């Protein structure tokens, strides 16, 4: 049960003063969740991202051009518009003149707000026009009394269409008034050493800033609130993990026979990183603690082989294994990699997707239930109720951040104490890995398998596309296979991005039926047919959207062209580039960009030319874009943060992690004095699911 102390914060935002039905709907659109409309708490946690400094109060002569100033003026003359021109008001002070400009203005309103001869304060951006200073649509027009209530720094909030800034400011003031007196849940010495305000003071300072510095992400105000959020998240992760590990694992030591056979059948030697990861996984599987491990591997680092050897250990112990991937293309790719190796060791493997015929599905289900099937590879179809295993020992989940938490846990619930190995081809900076996957142990594959050639990466202005096409003609004569990636499927009226369909048609004019097309809106069978034609060499150029970003493996492909490369994120460009350089032939990646490039886009392309190290690229991407974009948080339902920004607050995350560990070691049930206040923190940041697990025991 939520403590009654917090009830005022979970009331509807429509209960705040000045929020009528129309604005309540707009707040719901902006801040509401799937299960509820906007609440007082949502308004409190919706912090301003910028502020307008109203403290600069110069004379007209001193007012800097291009900056916001608040100026005391005397109204001299009104000049109503001729035809469709603007309404102008001439104003002055003892130092000079200022023209106030209003487009499509209501003349009666302007006359009332700025009567001739009156003294007023106007606040807004000062500009030059025809050598005269002007202020277009002043943000504020105030008399002396009104000036007293003008905030020194006016907060700027993210809004939705139709919701005005003043409404949001008023809602925030009303929400602050509802904030109850809360106990301090952080260590007092830690708060003092950082010079942080209390939680309530920090919220007040964020919504009522006294200086622009109060709104910076690295300010003491934001650092305090970010730490509270990170601590609540780390506590929740640890409580979830302890619950998962309370279900004892079943030791799966295996005898090593199948693994030795598989290693002997591999056409290459394992890398040092693969060997290390396999030792960590083998120790986890042999333990009576349930395994929850994340295997990070850069593109082409050999995660699938590690997963297969882990599955072999479970099978040696007399159990079954499953591998779940987020898309059919990726599931099929894993199946085709695993099948020949597994069958050479005498193992049975099946593929299960949503497209299986009824007879195929029945056969797979029967073989799983009887134990005749050792390994099943599939999409989220595997978590459906009719997939019953005789004895599932290991669940491998690929690109696990693309699944919701419930989906990824569901496969592990198919049997008591199932060990879970999650994999991702997105190298994740350590701070992100701790934040998002802190409930898991981590293994990383940084080395490439022997024989892989470095990829030559070049940037070329899109104006030289004809030269690129001519170069492709020469490459195709040498037997090359080429990916050509476009950001969109079809032309859009408001976008100049190249479309995959249009590009495929253009290239077909030069190369005829050597050009294939694959995109996310195609039916599964058509996608597979296009991929198969490319893999077999029936087509030599595959025009694609980012559907090929992860997991597609055609070792013969040696050229990657990415059109409008400046529109992609760094990690995504790195993933796409990783589709080539998978064989023993020299490969190249051509980044076509439309200039002029902004600073961020230029930095992205430069980093990509400098390095193929996915972990370094991920760190740089974090600095350039923030954590949400890297992990696809906005799309995936992963736990994005409202306040904390890991590119700024990564150091605080380490403290939060240590604090959470120490707190739960000393008070695992949160029954002590600090434990009681920490429960309030978990409710405020809506991590109460962890408390339910705590009560469930």
Image: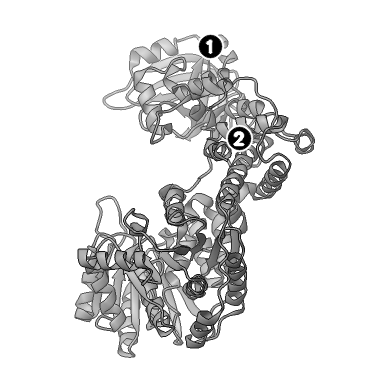
Nearer the camera: disc 2 or disc 1 = 2
Disc ID at residue 325: none
Q: Quadrant of residue 663?
A: top right
Q: Report the Cα–Cα distance between label 2 and label 1.
A: 28 Å
- Residue 131 or 240: which is nearer the viewer? 240
> Mark 2 — residue?
215
Q: Residues within 10 Å of mark 2 (few under 14, many from 20)?
A: many
| Quadrant the C terminus occupies | top right
Residue shown at the point (71%, 32%) measured from the top left:
672
Disc ID at residue 143: 1
Residue shown at the point (45%, 72%) measured from the top left:
578
Q: Is residue 599 left or right of residue 355?
A: right
**Residue 397 versus residue 637 in the image, above or below:** below
- SS assignment at label 2: helix
Is residue 201 visible to the viewer in this orientation of the structure?
A: yes
Q: Is residue 638 left or right of residue 444?
A: left
Q: Residues within 10 Å of mark 1 (few under 14, many from 20)?
A: some
Residue at the bottom extreme, as displayed: 478
Q: Is residue 594 left or right of residue 611?
A: left
**Residue 595 versus residue 164 in the image, above or below:** below
Residue shown at the point (22%, 68%) measured from the top left:
526
Total marks placed: 2
**Residue 533 versus residue 413 in the image, above or below:** below
- SS assignment at label 1: loop
Is residue 49 visible to the viewer in this orientation of the structure?
A: no
**Residue 4 versus residue 442 in the image, above or below:** above
């Amino acid at each position: 049960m939520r403590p009654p102390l917090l009830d005022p914060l979970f009331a509807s935002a429509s209960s705040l003063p000045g929020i009528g039905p129309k604005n309540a709907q707009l707040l719901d659109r902006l801040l509401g969740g799937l299960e509820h409309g906007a609440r007082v708490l949502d308004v409190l946690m919706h912090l301003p991202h910028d502020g307008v400094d109203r403290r600069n109060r110069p004379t007209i002569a001193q007012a800097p051009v291009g900056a916001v100033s608040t100026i005391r003026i005397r109204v001299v003359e009104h000049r109503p518009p001729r035809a469709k021109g603007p309404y102008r008001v001439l104003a002055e002070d003892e130092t000079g003149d200022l023209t106030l400009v209003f487009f499509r203005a209501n003349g009666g309103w302007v006359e009332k707000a700025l009567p001739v001869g009156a003294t007023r304060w106007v606040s807004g951006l000062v500009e030059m026009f025809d050598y005269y200073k002007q202020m277009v649509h002043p943000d504020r027009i105030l008399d002396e009394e009104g000036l007293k209530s003008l905030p020194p720094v006016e907060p700027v909030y993210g809004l939705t269409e139709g919701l005005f800034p003043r409404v949001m400011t008023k809602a925030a003031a009303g929400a602050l008034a509802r904030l109850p007196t809360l106990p301090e849940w952080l260590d007092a010495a830690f708060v003092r050493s950082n010079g942080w305000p209390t939680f309530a003071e920090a919220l007040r300072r964020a919504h009522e800033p006294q200086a622009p510095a109060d709104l910076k992400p690295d300010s003491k105000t934001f650092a305090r609130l970010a730490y509270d959020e990170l601590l609540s998240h780390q506590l929740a992760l640890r409580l979830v993990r302890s619950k998962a590990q309370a279900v004892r694992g079943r030791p799966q030591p295996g005898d090593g026979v199948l693994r030795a056979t598989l290693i002997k059948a591999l056409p290459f030697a394992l890398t040092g990183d693969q060997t290390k990861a396999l030792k960590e996984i083998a120790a986890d599987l042999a333990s009576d603690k349930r395994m929850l491990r994340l295997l990070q591997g850069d593109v082409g680092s050999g995660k699938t082989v590690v997963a297969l050897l882990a599955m072999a250990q479970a099978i040696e112990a007399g159990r079954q294994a499953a591998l779940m991937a987020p898309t059919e293309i990726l599931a099929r790719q894993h199946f085709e990699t695993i099948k020949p190796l597994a069958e050479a060791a005498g193992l049975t493997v099946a593929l299960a997707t949503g497209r299986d015929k009824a007879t195929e599905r029945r056969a797979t289900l029967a073989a799983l239930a009887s134990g005749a099937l050792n390994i099943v590879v599939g999409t989220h179809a595997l978590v459906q109720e009719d997939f019953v295993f005789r004895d599932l020992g290991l669940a491998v989940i690929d690109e696990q951040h693309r699944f919701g938490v419930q989906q990824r846990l569901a496969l592990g619930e198919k049997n008591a104490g199932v060990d879970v190995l999650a994999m991702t081809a997105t190298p994740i900076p350590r701070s992100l890995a701790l934040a998002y996957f802190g409930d898991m142990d981590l293994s990383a594959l940084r080395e490439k398998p022997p024989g892989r050639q470095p990829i030559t990466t070049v940037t070329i202005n899109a104006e030289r596309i004809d030269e690129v096409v001519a170069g492709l003609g020469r490459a195709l004569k040498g037997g090359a296979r080429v990916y050509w990636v476009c950001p969109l499927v079809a032309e859009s009226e408001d976008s100049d991005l190249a479309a995959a369909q249009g590009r495929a048609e253009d290239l077909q004019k030069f190369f005829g039926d050597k050009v294939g097309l694959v995109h996310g809106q195609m039916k599964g069978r058509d996608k597979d047919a296009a991929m198969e034609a490319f893999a077999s060499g029936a087509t030599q150029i595959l025009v694609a959207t980012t559907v090929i970003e992860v997991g597609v493996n055609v070792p013969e492909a040696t050229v990657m062209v990415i059109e409008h490369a400046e529109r992609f994120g760094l990690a995504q460009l790195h993933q796409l580039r990783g589709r080539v350089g998978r064989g023993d032939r020299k490969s190249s990646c051509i980044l076509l960009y439309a200039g002029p490039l902004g600073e961020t886009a230029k930095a992205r392309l430069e980093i990509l030319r400098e390095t193929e190290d996915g972990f370094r690229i991920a760190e740089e991407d974090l600095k350039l874009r923030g954590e949400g974009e890297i992990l696809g948080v906005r799309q995936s339902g992963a736990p994005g943060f409202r306040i904390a920004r890991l590119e700024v607050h990564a150091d605080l995350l380490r403290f939060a992690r240590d604090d959470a560990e120490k707190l739960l070691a000393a008070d695992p049930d949160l029954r002590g004095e600090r434990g009681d206040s920490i429960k309030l923190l978990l409710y405020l940041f809506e991590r109460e699911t962890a408390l339910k697990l705590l009560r469930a025991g």
